[in-house]
Structures are given as structure tokens and as C-alpha cells.
Image (cartoon, grey):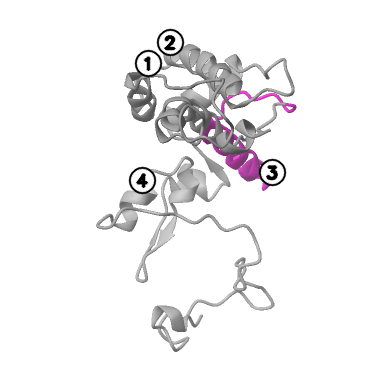
Amino acid sequence: MSFPELGLSTDRLYDIKPKPRGGLPFDFNGYGGIDLIVAQDGLIASDLLNGFDLEICKASFDGKKFHIPDPHLTFAAKTKMETNRRAVVGSYVAHYQVPENQYFGAIEFSRNASTTISAVRRDVPNTPFYKRLDLANMLPDLYNPNARMFDHHGTFQDPMVKMKHGASIQFHNWCCKLIDRLRKYQQRGIEVVDAPTIAANFRTDQFSIIAHEMM
């Protein structure tokens, strides 16, 4: 493998080759699905890996050694889901109801998501994922349904309104992303041994608070 952008100009540095007549299961052109992981300056790769939702995703190569978590599961194409995320997702899909009004706006969806989150927090009271929700709950509600669409005060263009009501929408989107990732790995043949129960017809529609406010 040769990656000039990383300062690796020769294949001899990392001599990784497939079996005879085989191929490496990697898309060198980047045309497939790639997850971009963004971290604060100062964090090391192992800190990021420890925060992944599925144990099998923590397998890594640091340039010298391969690190395989739960090898007895990983090499059997099985994995566990991180405990807190599994509990939150399981509770969220159990309580979530699609809004009755298909033409709902951002504020209606935010309140609908907040109702679901309240039920989730009763089921799963202690996780590290509620900090932004708690901060949003402390903010004053400046939303004004009579504000002009392009006025920054009282609409979802207002940063305070966006933070107050957008936190629950972001939480919903985050749960949907976890479900999509779970399904993606299951479709690849990975058995998630402790996966939460999710109905096959459960929809993982994600929402933009700005786009829905302007509809």
C-alpha cells in the first residue's frame, strides 16, 4: 500500500498483501461508504475507538500492530453493542411514535421527540448522552410562532431557539444513525449478539430543524 499524502512512498513500509488470487477488502478509491471521525485536538485514536457503538468497529491497525477487541466474537463475525447506546436505542424505538400530522413543522417534531426522550430517560436514567438535553432544558423558550420566517428572533434561525428545541431533534437523529449502523452491519452478516429489538418497518427518517421550519 502506498499513501503519499501520509508520507508513505513505498509499499515496503507496510507490506500487506492478500492471499494468492485474493483481494484486499478495501476500497482504495474511496467510492464506498466511509465514516469520517472528527475529534478535538489532543485526543488520540484509542480514545475515539473506545467510543464506538459496536465492539467489532474497534478493530484497528496502528502501523505496527493489529488490535482486535473480543477476538472470540470478532473472528466469528459477531459483536456486542455498547451498553448505554443499546439501552437508549431499545427504549427509543419502543416509545417513538411518528407524528400524526405528516406536514408537521420543526417545533411539532421537537415536542414529539421530547415526549419520546422523557420516556427513554425514565427507562435509562443514567447515560453520558443527556448533557446537551439538560442544557437545552435550562434555556428560556424564545420560540415565537408569529415571528416572520426570515426574522432571526423567535424562529429556528435564532441560535437560542435552535439550541432549545433542536437538542431533541439532534437526539432523534443520533438514535436513527445508531439504528442505521446496526442494520448495516447486520446486513453484512455480522451478528450483534445483544442487539435491541427493532421492527423491520421502523423508519429512521432524520430531520433538519431549519428545513422543516421553512416548509
48 lies above or below 14: above
Q: Secondary structure at mark 4?
A: loop
Q: Amino acid at mark 1?
A: Pro
Question: Which label number is shown at residue 50?
Answer: 4
* Distance of label 3 from label 1 (alpha carbons): 31 Å
Q: Are marks 4 and 3 in contact (CB under 8 Å)?
A: no
79 lies above or below 32: above
Residue 51 in the image: state x and y as whole percent: 38, 43
Q: Is residue 189 magenta?
A: yes
Residue 188 in the image: state x and y as whole percent: 67, 48
Evaluate whether residue 193 shows in this view. no
Q: Secondary structure at mark 1?
A: loop
| Foreground: disc 2 or disc 4 | 2
Viewer-proximal residue among 166 and 49: 166
Labels 3 and 1: the sequence-earlier one: 1
Q: Is residue 27 magenta?
A: no
* Distance of label 2 from label 4 (alpha carbons): 26 Å
Q: Which residue is mark 1?
A: 125
Q: Secondary structure at mark 2?
A: helix
For label 2, the crowd category at 10 Å Cα-Cα, with few meaning under 14, some 14 to 19 and many 20 or more, is: few
Labels 2 and 3: the sequence-earlier one: 2
Viewer-proximal residue among 206 and 89: 206
For label 1, the crowd category at 10 Å Cα-Cα, with few meaning under 14, some 14 to 19 and many 20 or more, is: few
* Distance of label 4 from label 1 (alpha carbons): 22 Å
For label 4, the crowd category at 10 Å Cα-Cα, with few meaning under 14, some 14 to 19 and many 20 or more, is: few
Labels 2 and 4: the sequence-earlier one: 4
Q: Which residue is mark 2?
A: 122
Labels 4 and 1: the sequence-earlier one: 4
Task: Give the position of the C terminus as an image quadrant.
Answer: top right
* Residue range corresponding to the magenta coloring: 174-201
Q: Amino acid at mark 4?
A: Asn
